[in-house]
Every structure is written in C-alpha cells, then in structure tokens.
Amino acid sequence: MDRFKELENINLSRLKRKIPLLSKSYSLKYVRETMHPDPPKEKLEKLLQGTTLNIYWFLLTHPEGFAGIREIQKGLKLSSPGLVSYHINNLISVGIVAKNEENEKYYVKEEIKSGIYGFYFRLGYHVIPRFTIYLGVFILCLIVFLGFLLTRGDRYILDPSNWVFLFVLVFGTMVFMYESLKIWKMKP
C-alpha cells in the first residue's frame, strides 16, 4: 500500500484536467478498495469448497461463459438467490469472478490452477481431466501398433520385443484410463 502514498500527495485538481476519469468522482480510495491482490493459495483452497466451489465450477463450465444469480440458483438447485449472492461476493473478493455491468451477469475472471483444478484443462466451456490427453495418445499408439502387428505377419507377431512394447502400451492405457476416471469423479 506504500505505492499509493505518492498518489495521495498529488494535486487532484491538476490531474482532473489531464485525466477525464478522475473528474467522474473516482478517487484513490475507491481505486485502492477495488484492487484485488493475489490471494494466497491456502485462502483459495479454503474458499473453493462446498457451494462456493460448485458456483465457481458452474460459471467455469457454463456454455455462454457467464450467468446471472437466478440462473445459478436454478442450475445448482440452491435455496435462495441470497445464498448465491453471498458465495459470488466471496469469489469476487478474491478476484477470480467478476460482474459484467452491462447484463448484470457474472463470469470467471481468472482460472485457478491449484488444488483439484490442476488436474483439469479447459477446452471451450468443457473442463476435461488432463490425463485424457495422455489416454488418447496411448490409445492412438495402441491402435497403430495393432495395425502393424496384424499387417506384418507371423514374424512380426512372434518377436518378443513387440510383445514387451504391446504390454507397455496396454498397461499405460489402463493406468491413464483409471486416473482419468478417478479425476473425473472428483469434479464438483
């Protein structure tokens, strides 16, 4: 907050002529109060639990990218709009959700990559476990290898190194399938 001490000492009447925004009743106090410092990871992980986590996830995966309070309430089957508003205000206070002033709807301003969210990546409005990428690569390699195995003949099939490679591909596919399903079940 020391960086604002210099700004408070500046003559505001001189700045109002140069910067039109200051003439519209903006003050340094307002700017200071609306700034969101980066919240610590512990605070985010503590905040992103239960209903707050469900609301964040709803906004993150919403097809339009933003939603109003009533829409969130109906989508999550919550008891009241006040409850949604409370949790939205908590998310706004740490700076990861913002409100669009034009349509009065909320959107995710900053994606979180800690905790459970470190295991997901976003593809449009879909949130997918990152292990599915690895699973896709292993399945593709397995299909290509089986194609080679079937088209090359008996000599290729009987080679022990090919069986080791096939074992590695099948094992990797099973591991990444298990991990993808486990992460998918953890989503809110």
Image (cartoon, rainbow, N blue to C red):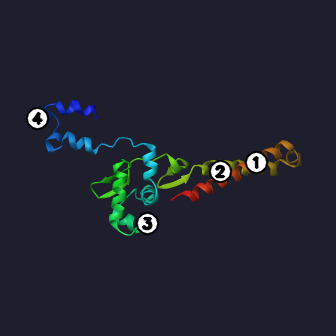
Amino acid bearing label 2: Leu
Do callouts 4 and 2 mark residues in contact (Cβ within 8 Å)? no
Q: Residue at x 16, y 40 (%)?
A: 22
Which of discs 3 and 2 lies nearer the camera? The answer is 3
Label 3: how many residues lie within 10 Å, few (<14), some (14-19) or many (20+)? some
| Location of residue 57 in the rendering, given as x and y in whole percent from the top left corner | 45, 57
> Which residue bears the numbered disc 3?
76
Q: Determine the CA span between mark 3 and mark 2.
A: 31 Å
Residue 13's label in the rendered image is 4
> Which residue bears the numbered disc 2?
135
Amino acid bearing label 3: Leu
Q: Quadrant of the N terminus?
A: top left
**One can see residue 68 in this view:** no
| Location of residue 3 in the rendering, given as x and y in whole percent from the top left corner | 27, 31
Which of discs 4 and 1 lies nearer the camera? The answer is 4
Camera-nearest residue between 75 and 90: 90
Using residue 40 as the reference point, say whether residue 9 is left or right of it: left
Q: Determine the CA span between mark 3 and mark 1.
A: 45 Å
Label 2: how many residues lie within 10 Å, few (<14), some (14-19) or many (20+)? many
Residue 114's label in the rendered image is none
Q: Earlier in the sequence, mark 4 or mark 3?
A: 4
Which of discs 4 and 2 lies nearer the camera? The answer is 4
Element on which disc 1 rests = helix
Which of discs 1 and 2 lies nearer the camera? The answer is 2
The quarter of the displayed image where residue 105 is located: bottom left
Q: How many marks?
A: 4
When the figure is inspected, residue 85 is found, relative to residue 74, above or below; the finding is above
Q: Earlier in the sequence, mark 1 or mark 2?
A: 2
Camera-nearest residue between 65 and 70: 70
Element on which disc 3 rests = helix
